[in-house]
Image (cartoon, rainbow, N blue to C red):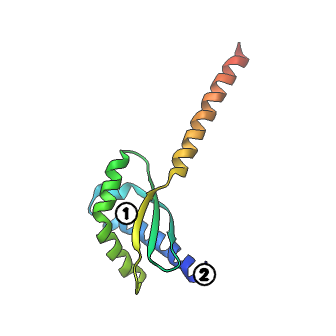
Amino acid sequence: MSLSLKRMESTALRELSIILNREAKNELLKHITITEVRITNDLSYMTVFYSFYQGKMEDYTKALEESNGYLRSALAKKLNARKMPELIFKFDESLAYGNHIDELLNEYHKKHDNKEEK
């Protein structure tokens, strides 16, 4: 992967986070955290991984789909991109998976601690 592509991904992550947090009209978008951005080598697609902390997945998915055109044009202005990739939003399951593992470990420790006390 070229250095300029890596730099574009990093800049896109930062700028998209700012757009969502400060400029988006839909309040749901302000609660989204961009975790990673990947751009194909031919600049056709930009996959944006995101997470959120409360609410329903369907609500966030719908908000992102409805705002896709706006987000793409706002990001193109910030990046000064000649060719702006198509945005694809994907939920980042790594945080949810990590939280699930934490819950399992906590349950294990509670059970284990209770056995030692008896």
Count of marks placed on residues: 2
In the foreground, 86 or 55: 86
Percent across and percent down for residue 47 are 46, 66
Say which element carries label 2: helix
Amino acid type assigned to the residue bearing label 2 in the image: Leu
Residue depicted at x 34% and y 70%: 71
Residue identified by numbered label 2: 3
Residue in view at x 45 percent, y 64 percent: 48
Q: Is residue 44 above or below residue 80?
A: above
Query: Badge 1: few (under 14), some or many (20 or more) residues near its Cα, within 10 Å?
Result: some
User: Which residue is the extreme one toward the right?
Assistant: 116
Q: Which residue matches tag 1?
A: 21
Q: Are marks 1 and 2 in contact (CB under 8 Å)?
A: no
Q: Is residue 54 above or below residue 114?
A: below
Viewer-closest of 39 and 3: 39
Write the residue at 37% across / 63% down.
21
Mark whose residue sits in front, 1 or 2: 2
Q: Classify the position of the C terminus by image quarter.
A: top right
Residue 45, image x, y percentages:
44, 72
The residue sitting at 49% across, 75% down in the picture is: 11
Splitting the image into 4 quarters, where does residue 115 fall?
Answer: top right
Q: Position of residue 57 (x, y in %)?
A: 38, 48
Residue 2 vs 94, above or below: the answer is below
